[in-house]
């Protein structure tokens, strides 16, 4: 008879029943871990939405979208089709929602030009009227977006993540006035997304 300090694993470890119970216990722990990871993903998304909403409420950026450039799960290579999709969005009048319209867009030459500049510099500021002609410029003009500021968030082998802050105002004073709110949002989104990317 084992003493009372023995663990159940020690007591049962040498029997078939013990092996079965140990295996069931491991399955339980693995499932619990998966649930924890899933729950954390929802909480992380909530943090991103909260940061974006705070920026929208306290600044002139009334449409903020977190995008991913991707290749439908495959590595992004020049020899493969490339797409862009909106992942998270917050918006307020006068803008309309764009998230459902920007799903699996084939990246055209104009979008590639903007993304390339952002990748090289880490950010890109664009006046919509000065953007290269293409689908992105068309939807920005349709929604009366005057300026946008895009920032690189992070990447994996199969996805690139970036965020865009859009406003109907584009003067230097407006940009300067909103800088602190945008930076607060960026800090949260970057930290949360980069933590999430490490789990991919």
Image (tube, rainbow, N blue to C red):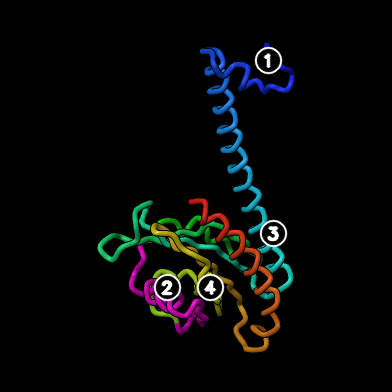
> Does residue 13 lie above or below 112 as drawn?
above
Residue beneath label 3, please? Answer: 50
Q: Secondary structure at mark 2?
A: helix
Figure check: 169 above or below 160: below
Location of residue 157 in the rendering, given as x and y in whole percent from the top left corner: 39, 59
Number of the label disc, if any, that sits on residue 150? none
Residue drawn 51% across and 77% down?
Answer: 123
- Helix, strand or loop at label 3? It is helix
Position above or below: 135 against 86: below
The residue wearing badge 4 is: 151
Disc 1 is placed on an element classified as loop
**Magenta-colored span:** 106-130
Out of 174 and 50, give the one closest to the viewer: 50
Q: Earlier in the sequence, mark 1 or mark 4?
A: 1
Give the CA separation, mark 1 to mark 4: 62 Å
Residue 157 or 180: which is nearer the viewer? 157
Q: Which residue is under mark 1?
A: 2
- Between 185 and 155, which is closer to the camera in this rendering? 155
Q: Image point 68% across, 15% down: which residue?
A: 2
């Amino acid at each position: 008879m084992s003493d009372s300090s023995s663990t159940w694993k020690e007591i049962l470890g040498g029997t078939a029943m013990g092996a079965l119970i140990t295996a069931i216990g491991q399955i339980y722990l693995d499932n619990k871990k998966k649930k924890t990871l899933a729950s954390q993903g929802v909480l992380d998304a909530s943090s991103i939405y909260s940061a974006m909403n705070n920026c929208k409420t306290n600044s002139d950026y009334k449409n903020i979208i977190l995008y991913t450039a991707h290749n439908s799960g495959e590595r992004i290579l020049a020899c493969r089709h490339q797409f862009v999709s909106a992942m998270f969005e917050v918006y307020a009048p006068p803008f309309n929602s764009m998230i459902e319209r920007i799903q699996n867009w084939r990246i055209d030459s104009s979008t590639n030009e903007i993304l390339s500049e952002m990748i090289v510099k880490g950010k890109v500021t664009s006046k919509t009227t000065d953007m290269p002609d293409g689908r992105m410029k068309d939807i920005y003009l349709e929604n009366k977006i005057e300026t946008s500021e895009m920032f690189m968030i992070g990447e994996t082998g199969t996805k690139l993540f970036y965020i865009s802050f859009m406003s109907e105002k584009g003067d230097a004073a407006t940009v300067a006035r909103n800088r602190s709110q945008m930076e607060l949002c960026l800090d949260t989104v970057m930290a949360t997304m980069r933590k999430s990317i490490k789990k991919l």
